Amino acid sequence: MHLCLSYLLCLHAGKEWKSGIYVDGSKLNHKMPEDETTGESGEEREEEVVLFGYEEELKEAQSALNEYLWGKHKNIAIVSDPFAGRSTLVEYLARDYLTTTIAFNSVMTEKAFISTLHDANNIIVMENCHFLAMRKIGGFAQLDEFLKFLSKSDKLFITTWNTYSWSYLSAVKNLDEFFPKVIRLEPMNAESLKKMILSHYGNNIEYIDDAASKEKKLSISWKFAHIKIPFSSTTRTLPWPYLDLSSIFHKKKQENAEKLIFDRLTRVSDGSPGIARKIWDASIDYPKIRLSSIKEPTFDTDLSINEAFLLGIILTMEKIEPGDLAEIAGPEIDVEESLYILMNRELVAREEGYYIINYRALKSVKSYLELNRMVW
Amino acid sequence: MPNGVLTNTTEQLTTLPFNEIGVETILYIVFIIVIAYLLVRVISFVLRFVSEKIPSYRHPITMLIPLLKITIYFTALYYVLFALIEPDLTQLIAFFGLFGAALGLGLKDLLADIVGGLVIIFEKPYQIGDKITFGDYYGEVKDIGIRSTKLVTPDDSQVSVPNFKIFSEAVSSGNAGDIAMMVVIDLFIDPDGESGKAMSILKEAVTTSKFVIVSKKYPCTILLQDFPYYKRIRARAYVNDLRNEFEFMSEVTRRAWIEYRKLGIHPTQYRFPETGSSDSGNGS
């Protein structure tokens, strides 16, 4: 694995300008992982960014940025699950400021990126920072270098991280001490997902309720309550089951179907905008969308410790090359055999030479690994 | 017991309205016992199955098993007694008084085991699934029965420890109801070895292990101690599931020594007198 700075480009976003550097361990002009989740290509990044559902998080980040301009320095960590839209948020956030953007696209094994930080603007956006560390002996060198630089620097760092990498690195490397402002992108509710999806598809969708009558009468969905923890700036999201009987009394069938479809979409996608969008794209027969087309898949997650460990690594890294995975696994684990099993069970997919979590299985994978304490 | 009370109790019992014990009564009693036994087996199986599916809640779920076991068996005893006699309240109290005295005299060990079992269930010095040292034995608690606690030792031997020992012997639980458990891993290096690097490598070997859990609640600590002929590098960390205790130790030790050798950190050559072997600790 070697480092190469793939390209340096200037983007015009709104009134201001910014520079962006895409750092890829192996390939030139590789697409961003977040872009893949939303179906946007690297070139499409120049389009006007529209943000749905993360208004509160955006405000929090903007206020930290403004505080920096007034002399109060708080590095920012934006933390989320895969497919949650971190890149979109930081792009939206950084558009009105003079920033340098560095986006990591695969595991970093050399520290050349540090020299880029020296020459960068005062506000540095660093995307996918979980690629700075590998879970193996000697795998934290790049992260250590970065944190060393950061601790001596007056620059403001806006970084994005995978949720599970963040928790792991906070425990192992005290990462949270370096980023006093942590913004977590929590799952979206049905209303926000609907807004996001309809912004792409318009309002002329025909919703068809062709599911079993049981579901029509009784709808259970997850709601998310945002709880502010006393004596702390942290906000936590608590999920709670919501039993909706209103559809029994609903007279307008069109509205009922629409609600059922978005409730199911929220449930299946676990509130993830990237996954919801993918499921929607796969389910719609424009302009019609049927409730039955949004399927709730089940996966066999009865795994050995080695398979679970590799699955956890793929989840925390979001995308990883087979070579890097083999390095992390060491000689004790037969990586090829384990990956074959994981792919056979449709938990993992291979895309452009990288292993990623199958987006449909993300919810099951997270739940399984959390229950078994392979990730936390 | 004063003479007057004893006479009174005996009188009460001689007037106990014993039912006629026929084949039907015997069949009924057998039926109750079989149902109670099957119920205990089924509930135990279901709860164990569920607990394995939800590892984080394994201990709370399995701890329901002994509680339900005792409840079911006492309920069965109640039905059996009422199949044999139909006492009024005074007679019932008298019966249990004498029954208790008989137990105390003849079956005092069994009674002590039952009371010990109740103490274990409610006081929870250990739970099903814990790794404990009880008397001379170390192992995972597989079952807390009415009479004894069953342990499975690391070499897969099953040991039954009578419950009454809880009153007389100290019990240490490595995880106290948690599924994660602290594990101590010692590596002994040559006194000339670079201890800073050795500590740093051991820390990374621990924190990158597939068996580890690290958080504020489950911290990882690395300690160094100098001895005349060796340095001891000690890691204290938590294994994510106590069933992986030994695999965790083995994996960390193996990976740490591979890195030590690359850096020229060698095992101590000191020969420990008590073992008589060149105890590089874990340098193999």
Image (cartoon, coloured by chain):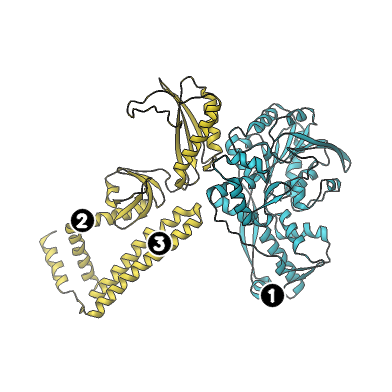
Chain colours: A cyan, B yellow
Q: Are marks 2 and 3 on the same chain?
A: yes
Q: Secondary structure at mark 1?
A: helix
Q: Residue at x 53, y 33 (%)?
A: B203
Q: Specify the subunit that label 1 lies on.
A: A
Which residue is nearer to you in this view: A40 or A26? Answer: A26
Q: Amino acid at mark 2?
A: Lys
Q: CA distance from mark 2 to mark 3?
A: 28 Å
Q: Amino acid at mark 1?
A: Phe
Which residue is nearer to you in this view: A60 or B125? Answer: B125
Q: CA distance from mark 1 to mark 3?
A: 44 Å
Label 2 vs 3, first from the N-terminus: 3
Q: Which residue is mark 1?
A: A249
Q: Residue at x 55, y 29 (%)?
A: B200
Mark 3 residue crowding within 10 angstroms, few (<14) / some (14–19) / many (20+): some
Q: Secondary structure at mark 2?
A: helix
For residue A376, say whether it is visible. no
Looking at the picture, how far across and down is residue A181, in whole percent? Answer: 68, 39
Mark 1 residue crowding within 10 angstroms, few (<14) / some (14–19) / many (20+): few
Q: Is residue A273 left or right of residue B63?
A: right
Q: Which residue is mark 2?
A: B108
Placement of B35 over or under B201, stated as above or below: below
Placement of B43 over or under B82, stated as above or below: above
| Residue A46 in which image quadrant | top right
Looking at the picture, how far across and down is residue A280, in whole percent? Answer: 75, 61
Q: Which residue is mark 3?
A: B44
Q: Specify the subunit that label 3 lies on.
A: B
Q: Amino acid at mark 3?
A: Ser
